[in-house]
Amino acid sequence: MTELRLPEMGLVLLIGVSGSGKSHFAARHFRPSQVVSSDHCRLVVADDENDQSATGDAFDLLHHIVATRLRRGLLTVVDATNVQPKAREALLRIAKDHDVLSVGIVLDVPEALAKARNALRPERRLPDHVIPRQRRELRRGMRGIGREFKRHYVLDGEAEIDAATIVYEKAW
Ligand code: CTP
Ligand code: MG
């Protein structure tokens, strides 16, 4: 069982392809107000959480919410794929600007599982190539991920993801 040690105040990035279970994990372990999701931000700015043309505006909003919460001293969890190092970099910069710690949690599931889960989601319409591309992006960035975060965890497979528990630590 993996014990995820998180700061009481800081930035947590969930990292994983579509269908890896980020939103499920976030709902299980955090209060709704602690979770900032790219899908929700897309919905807010476009009335449609699948509207890819709204990505720029959605992430501007997401970054604004993250910065505001960190300034106000609130633990903040980002529920977005975060598979691209550049996407993580923008968020880690906001954490750094606010002088708070960042933790990455990678949810690594087999491609077949992510695809099978998404096939059961009427609200999620993804072209076939998207999950393989996200997995490649994730793989490529994994080597350097230790340098990005003060601490990061890789949960490998559904059983390990389901068994993970969280403990909060005051001092790091
Ligand atoms: N799911 C499940 N059992 C789990 C985790 C997820 O049955 N242990 C289901 C969820 O209920 C959902 C689907 O698998 O219907 C995808 O999980 P979700 O958490 O929504 O995946 P995300 O990583 O958030 O996907 P996206 O990036 O597309 O938002
Ligand atoms: Mg999700």
Image (cartoon, rainbow, N blue to C red):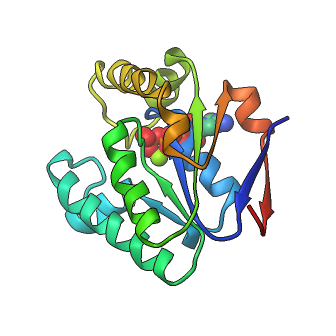
Q: Residue at x 63, y 47 (%)?
A: 25
Tell me the quarter of the picture where residue 21 sits: top right
Tell me the quarter of the picture where residue 135 sits: top left
Who is closer to the viewer here, 10 or 83? Answer: 10
State whether residue 118 is above or below residue 80. above
Question: Residue 115: where, in percent of width, then height?
Answer: 46, 22
Q: Residue at x 27, y 47 (%)?
A: 50
Q: Farthest residue to the bottom: give it.
A: 72
Question: Residue 93: where, in percent of width, then height?
Answer: 38, 59
Q: Farthest residue to the left: give it.
A: 53
State whether residue 166 is above or below residue 141. below
Q: Residue at x 55, y 44 (%)?
A: 22
Q: Residue at x 49, y 24 (%)?
A: 143
Who is closer to the viewer here, 119 or 44? Answer: 44
83 sits to left or right of 143? left
132 sits to left or right of 171? left
Question: Residue 68: where, in percent of width, then height?
Answer: 41, 79
Who is closer to the viewer here, 105 or 144? Answer: 144
67 sits to left or right of 69? left
Q: Quadrant of the C terminus?
A: bottom right
Q: Farthest residue to the right: give it.
A: 1
Q: Quadrant of the N terminus?
A: top right
Q: Quadrant of ligand 1?
A: top right
Question: Residue 147: where, in percent of width, then height?
Answer: 51, 39
State whether residue 144 is above or below residue 82. above
